[in-house]
Amino acid sequence: MPTNPICVAIDTPDLDKAVALARALKPHVGWAKIGMEFFYAHGIAGYARVAEAGLPVFLDLKLHDIPNTVASAMKSLMRIEPRPAIVNLHATGGFDMMKAAAEAVAGQSKLIAVTILTSLSDDDIWAAGFETAKNTEAHARSLAELSRRAGLDGVVCSPHDVVGIRHDLGRDFLTVVPGIRPAEAALQDQKRAATPEAALAAGADILVIGRAITGAADPAKAARNILAGLHAG
């Protein structure tokens, strides 16, 4: 695990921009996240170009399908070189899907599950049909516990949910936390966000930060400033 907890979200369909960002940010961040926007545009070849910068890659494809399909997809992802450091799926795919994925990955990468997206509020999960969920935090904690039982290494969760998940599942369960916004940054489409300092203090292992870095006039400087704030805290 890199000592730098910042994972920069390289969510762009522009291959040259993605490669330039990875190279420029390598000295200042611990991870690079490659998401669907980039991967669907450039596939494995594009992934390899970004990975050449030398950062561990979190391949954020959020798989969600029947167990056999997800397990087969994970086996395919494990053949990518260099292999992703972290891959993920949606916890709402259920126990059998997650267990099949864990068996397919077989410890070759860290496998984590998305609990509740940071763009969703209590009202949103109710509208989506989760009538039994009291609130996003309770539902995220339940999904995290299910993920652990299925053999996963951790979860993607809101900064608001980290304390409860840490309480339930301990220090060794990986928490990858998006919805990170420096104090001066706009929330944009995030509804359950926190500052980098607050998320780290709550127990986050990895802080996924996108537009606050990649949208800055000087992304390297923005990453350095965020890291300096974490060290100051």
Image (tube, helix red, strand yellow):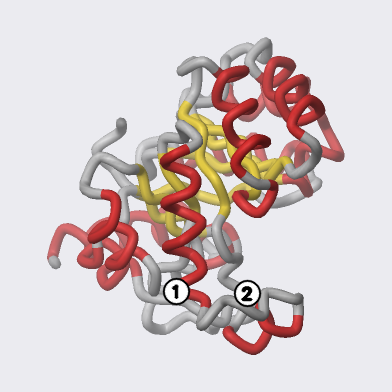
Could you say which is closer to the camera, residue 123 or residue 7?
123
Residue at position x 66%, y 80% from top? 131
**Image position of 108 (left or right of 125):** left
Crowd around label 1: few <14 · some 14–19 · many ≥20 (10 Å): many
Q: Position of residue 37 (x, y in %)?
A: 78, 49
Which label number is shown at residue 67?
none
Q: Is 79 located above or below residue 62 in the figure?
A: above
Which quadrant holds residue 198? bottom left
Residue at position x 20%, y 66% from top? 201
Q: CA distance from mark 1 to mark 2?
A: 13 Å
- Element on which disc 2 rests: loop
Crowd around label 2: few <14 · some 14–19 · many ≥20 (10 Å): some
- Element on which disc 1 rests: helix
Which label number is shown at residue 119?
2
Which quadrant holds residue 34? top right
Q: Is 155 located above or below residue 117 in the figure?
A: above
What is the three-letter code of the residue carrying label 2?
Ser
Residue at position x 83%, y 32% from top? 42
Could you say which is closer to the camera, residue 225 or residue 105?
105
> From this viewpoint, which residue is outermost toward the left?
232
Could you say which is closer to the camera, residue 99 or residue 136?
99
Disc 1 designates what residue? 137
